Structures are given as C-alpha cells and as structure tokens.
Image (tube, helix red, strand yellow):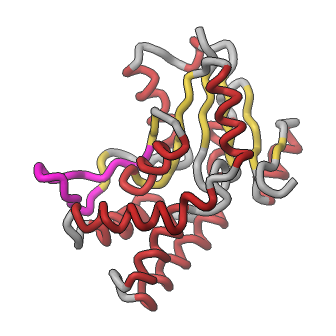
C-alpha cells in the first residue's frame, strides 16, 4: 500500500489565500461593488486568521456572489484569475514537495476549505488529481445555486470529507502505514492530529505554538 499525502492549499502550497484573492479579483474587475465586497471579504479573512470564522456563513457569502453570474462568465473570469494571480505564485518549493510524494507513489489529495469552483483549476495546475473541497450546489445547466452541498470542508469537517473520500475508494486512514498532512493553520489541528505524520507548513503563530508543544515538524516553503 502506498502512503497517503494530504495538503491544505492556501498558505500551504500557495503563499496566498486563493479564496480571499478571488474576492479581490472580482472587486478589481468591477464584477461586484468594490468597497462593499472588499470590506466584507476582509472581515471574513480576519475571522479566518483568528479561528473564529463561521464556515457555512462564509461559503454562503462566496457562493451567493458566484450565483449572480452565468457559469460561462465565471469560467472566463477564472481563466484570467489563474493567469494574473495564481500562476505567478505556484513556486518551485511547493512543486518540489508534491513531486517528492508523487515520485514515492503516494496517494495525494488537496484538502481545502475553499470551494471547488475556485480550487479545481488550481489543483490541476499543481498536478494534483484528487481534490477535497467545499462543494457548490449546481443547477442542471451547470450554473451555481449559491448553496453549499453538505458540511463545510473546514476544521473537523476536513476529517469527515477525507474519510468519505477514502471510503469511496475502499480505504481508510488505518490502511496507510504513513499518512501525511501539511497545513499552515490552527484551523486544521483536527485533521493534523489524526494522521501519522502531521507537518506544520508555513505555520501561523497559533499552529507554530501547537506544533512545538506536540513535537510536530515545522517546515517553511516560501521564506527560508
């Protein structure tokens, strides 16, 4: 059996928050009221950093905004977002870390609280086939309804969704001799705590303190 390597996305494989930057991108393009959206987006971002974010409330805000536009328009914007914002910050240290696990034949997945619309093209750009992300509800024509399917993929929700993903493959965490999870945030302590090899990656202050107390490895991909 190969090992399992799970990765958070924002501030872990990317040195930015893709969810926040998508909101900033929409503001810059004039797709949304710049002042109002930027203010609300910034409030949620501070809550996320502080560990006080209500993930369902946040997803309803983000997905509700997306639902205002036809999918074709959203896809066009996302192509520009990838070129302008994401591609320049996919850096060699992140690719090298992924390649180490790919070369080892590990089963790899990105596990992110950000929704699939934003993150699926990013996972593809990183060369990661499997993505566990917040799932937007879709209409039959592919447009978004503005609602979230199931529970958010944040906090303990990452455990629920990861277990469901593994179960769909006929697997569970106990089937792997080594299971890795790389994350930057204290919000991911639940999933970090149940893998065999938790690795604090570009960690914020709260996760750094927790990792040091637990004796977890700490790595920095972007500022060594």
Residue 162 vs residue 202, the one in the foreground: 202
Q: Quadrant of residue 169?
A: top left
Q: At which x and y percent is residue 98? A: 65, 35
Tell me what residue is drawn at x 51 percent, y 36 percent: 128
Q: At which x and y percent is residue 205? A: 80, 59
Tell me what residue is drawn at x 31 percent, y 72 percent: 65
Seen as rendered, the residue at the extreme top is: 1
Q: At which x and y percent is residue 46? A: 61, 73
Residue 73 vs residue 150, the one in the foreground: 73
Q: Using the image, determine if residue 81 lies above or below residue 124.
A: below
- Which secondary structure type mostly characterizes the magenta part of the structure? strand
Residue 168 vs residue 106, the one in the foreground: 106
Tell me what residue is drawn at x 63 percent, y 59 percent: 89
Please report the bounds of the magenta region as a residue range: 133-147
- Magenta-drawn stretch contains 205: no
Q: At which x and y percent is residue 70? A: 19, 66
| Numbered label tally | 0
Q: Using the image, determine if residue 157 lies above or below residue 59.
A: above
């Amino acid at each position: 059996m190969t090992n399992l390597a799970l990765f958070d996305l924002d501030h872990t494989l990317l040195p930015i928050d893709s969810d926040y930057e998508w909101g900033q991108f929409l503001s810059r393009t004039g797709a949304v009221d710049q002042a109002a959206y930027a203010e609300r987006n910034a409030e949620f971002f501070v809550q996320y950093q502080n560990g006080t974010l209500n993930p369902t409330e946040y997803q309803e805000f983000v997905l509700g905004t997306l639902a205002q536009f036809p999918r074709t328009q959203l896809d066009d914007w996302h192509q520009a977002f990838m070129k302008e914002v994401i591609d320049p910050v996919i850096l060699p240290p992140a690719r090298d870390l992924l390649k180490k696990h790919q070369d080892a034949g590990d089963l790899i997945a990105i596990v992110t609280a950000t929704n699939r619309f934003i993150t699926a093209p990013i996972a593809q750009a990183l060369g990661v086939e499997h993505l566990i992300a917040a799932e937007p509800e879709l209409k039959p024509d592919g447009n978004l309804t503005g609602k979230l399917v199931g529970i958010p993929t944040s906090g303990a929700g990452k455990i629920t969704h990861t277990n469901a993903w593994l179960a769909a493959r006929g697997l569970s965490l106990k089937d792997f001799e080594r299971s890795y999870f790389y994350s930057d945030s204290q919000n991911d302590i639940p999933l970090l705590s149940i893998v065999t090899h938790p690795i604090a990656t570009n960690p914020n202050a709260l996760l750094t303190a927790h990792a040091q107390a637990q004796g977890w490895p700490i790595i920095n991909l972007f500022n060594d």
